[in-house]
Amino acid sequence: MALGTPKRKRSTARAQYVADFETTTDENDCRVWGWGLANINTADSVWDVEMSNNMADFIDRISCEPSVCYFHNLRFDGHFIMDWLFRHGDFVHVDDNPGKGQFSTIISNMAQFYSITVTWCNGVRTEFRDSLKKLPLRVAEIAEAFNQPELKGSIDYHSYRPVGHQLTLEERTYLAHDVMIVARALKTEMAAGMTKLTVGSDSLADFKKILGAKVFEKMFPILPETMDAEIRRAYRGGFTYVAKRFQAKRLGAGRVYDVNSLYPSVMYHKPMPYGLPVFAPGLPKASKSHPLFTVTITFTAKLKKDHIPCIQVKGSSHFLATEYQTHIKEPTTITCTNIDLALWEEHYDMDILSYEGGWLFQSVDGVFNDYIDKWMEVKTKNRGGIRFIAKLHLNSLYGKFGTNPNITPKVPVFEDNVVKLVLGDPDTREPIYTAMSVFIAAYARDVTIRAAQQHYDVFAYADTDSLHLLVDCDPETLDVDPDKLGAWKREYIFSEALFMRAKTYTELVDGKHETHIAGLPVEIAAQLTFDDFSGGRTLVGKKTPKRVPGGIVLQDVDFTMPAL
């Protein structure tokens, strides 16, 4: 049993916990050397956190009562659980509804962990869930967002801790804070009715409640698999781009602007698709009744002078999927929305060789307004955790409509003394209404790209909902307002900047560097200056997981600064 923990009577009700493992970093000695467990509903302070120093104690403790137990990043901690299950008691993995001595998993084909459900040999069932799917922040950021008294601490992860190591006061405090921070935040979410497996599911459930389930089903019918797949081809992400003439150059002062709730703003103000679409051969003709469409085109294109490129070609060996093309010489086939097509024709000299048909949609105004009004009011009138919950609801709904119906899972197997993930049997589910995500994303890109183009001479960088402009005052042509939905809020002023590539840049703000490098931990990026941005420089600090006997170790690997 866990140290100081009395045996508990079995209950049919499910307790709710947050747990955390502290593990060794030696791949030849991979094990849990400490764990913490906090009851979401009853733990009031760090003194209520249960702890011990070995995995056996954790299994003994968690298997004594039915429970839902969250880990913040189940992808990591879950490997230690599955390793123990395969090594002890001959536990068997099953697809669903595990019986005694069995466990099931929900792991996507991209190795995203959602849950591990175990039925122990005594008949007690534990469902391990990933709190990262409910709170998409680092633990330190959760503490800040929810204005919590506990702060994320630090310990020496690489210090040697032998089997039987007694937890120090520093280690116990660190563990207690880690689980208490997440537990308090989850308690706030659950009190707000967020009980689903993910934030997106919570948001969709709330929207259906506001709109009405019957109205939702009528407006957003389940489309056939082939139709959904054709519409999905027009689904693209946000616009992230460095202006070529300013790339990799030491720049002077400027200002950064973010759209106030970009995705909710287009959901609020733009016409949205609904109903069963109608197929149209060739170029679909927009009408009053069906003003929106997707279309497949084959074309060549050349960027117009002094225009920002905005066409990406994915799934082709001839183009880098992350780059925006300036000259497409060979005939290329793409599916897009009419929103994208209109923008492309403004930015490029296009030779469209063929229109290969598409889907026409009816449109509706204001379908999300009641939902957005509700959560904007909550966001405006509250601070801390409640305000953060409102932001989650505002930003999580649109993507849920585009949930991929391909749910072919990865499943754990025990091979070569290590837990591995292999692709399971093909599986699908019904789509929700992919066209909604497709058009919301297209509208959002359109807003950002058009604003960047409008300020072409001073535009240096954009990332989804932000503009970095080389200006010393707010442009009169930009709707700048700190509160208005869809307006641009001035985030900060920088005195110098260097933009290397998408999601790789640094800006000097009040004498300190604001540095962002995709793939590099924020604590390492925060130490970098202009002089560090030279192609080929190698940094130490990036961590990569390695599956080993016992679980996972995080290894420090070299990170080479990207070169142009």
Image (cartoon, grey):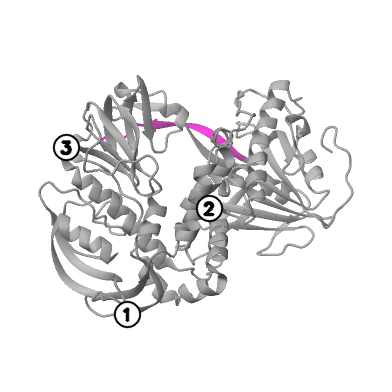
Quarter of the picture holding the N terminus: top right
The residue type indicated by label 3 comes to Arg
Residue 313 within the magenta-colored segment of the rendering: no
> Looking at the image, do the residues carrying marks 3 and 1 touch, with CB atoms under 8 Å apart?
no
Residue at 10% over, 49% down: 305
Residue named by callout 3 = 245
The dot on residue 17 is none
Q: Give the residue furthest to the left.
A: 305
Find residue 465 and report its horizontal and vertical position in percent.
Answer: 35, 46
Residue named by callout 2 = 111
Residue at 82% over, 50% down: 65
Q: Which residues are magenta?
A: 552-564
Pair 2/1: label in front: 1
The residue type indicated by label 2 comes to Ala
The number of callouts visible is 3
Of label 2 and label 3, which has the lower sequence position?
Answer: 2
Q: Real-space Cα distance between discs 3 and 1? A: 42 Å
Q: Is residue 323 visible?
A: no
Residue named by callout 1 = 279
On screen, residue 456 versus residue 3, left or right, reads left
Of label 3 and label 1, which has the lower sequence position?
Answer: 3
Label 3 SS: helix
